[in-house]
Image (cartoon, rainbow, N blue to C red):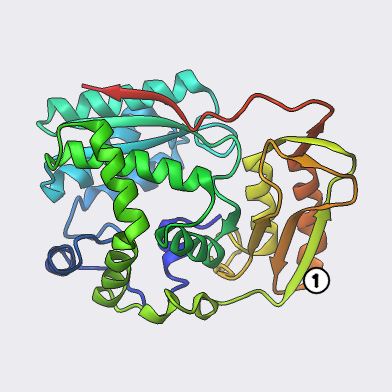
Amino acid sequence: TGGTLDKLESVPGFRVGLSVDELVETVRTAGCAICGASEEMAPADAVLYALRDATATVDSVPLICGSILSKKLAEGIVGLVLDVKCGAGAVFSDFDDADTLGRALVESGTSSGLPTVALVTDMDAPLGMAVGNAIEVAEAIDCLRGHGPADLRELSVQIVARMLVAGGVSDDLEKSVARAVAALDAGAGLERFEMMLIAQGGDPRVVSEPSRLGRAVRMRTVEGDRSGWLNRLDALQIGRAVARLGGARCRDDGRIDLAAGIRIRVPVGAEVVAGDGVLELQAADEDLLESAAEYARAAMTITDEPGVPRRLVLGTIES
């Protein structure tokens, strides 16, 4: 699918390109900011990434570390919490490879004077019940209301709790988890998100009216081909399906249909009946739905018996 910035650009007017001064002011007023790298901060990163792409070294652990940490160190932050994905939908599908990356990031960050923690988390299946761009922003807003899918909520709370400790706000992880849950349920996160939208030029009405994010005009349901348990939903195949729908940057002109995506109707681990809708495909064109359906079907693994419950956090790496 699109990246984080692509997703947020589904908010009308939202600016992802901020100067250093604008970034500082946004964090000062809203308490948070989400933006892209700029020529003012770690300017060599874009040049090095282009070289990595040309030399097939995009997945080089030392170069990944340099790319990620150069921007964090330039920002002058006091603590860093990283979510290192592992599974079919991640750069590294193998846990050992993801763990190696996490340890390299923690070691490099810490040795540079930046206390760093990495969580290795599962991305074998999609996180949440929405995959795309605008559709994921709408789901994030729902989560910030204190609702949303349980897995998205759980991982968000775990990361926030670690951030409270890393930032020196708390020295107790268990109390930090409770504090994060209380803030989420009280709507504090949604309030800050709305403030961030305003500070970065976005339309804050999307918070109360998610339809302003845009909606696809064509939809198609993909059913389970047998009864049983949805034991797996392959994140890579789901991502390929979203790309076929137009929701990823794979066209010659680089354009993305921000409204395209997939809504997951049945969570992984749940029981399904043959013919029941498991996935809802959303796109601008009927032909795109047909093209994506093949990948969506390939993503589903339905078994006679329930599988092992999903573990979101597979490992924690601290200095």
Q: Residue at x 76, y 56 (%)?
A: 292
Q: Is residue 131 left or right of residue 13?
A: right
Q: Considering depth in this image, is 197 or 191 the residue closer to the camera?
A: 191
Q: Residue at x 54, y 50 (%)?
A: 149
Q: Indicate whether 315 appears above or below 23.
A: above
- Residue 203 in sight in this render: no
Identified by mark 1, the residue type is Glu
Numbered-mark total = 1
Q: Considering depth in this image, is 192 or 243 the residue closer to the camera?
A: 192
- Residue 197 in sight in this render: yes
Return the x and y of residue 283 as percentages of the image width and height: 70, 69
Q: Indicate whether 107 appears above or below 23.
A: above
Q: Considering depth in this image, is 53 or 169 the residue closer to the camera?
A: 169
Q: Residue at x 30, y 79 (%)?
A: 201
Find numbered disc 1 in the image and state the secondary structure of the residue it sits on. Answer: helix
| Quarter of image, res 300 | top right
Q: Indicate whether 89 appears above or below 309.
A: below
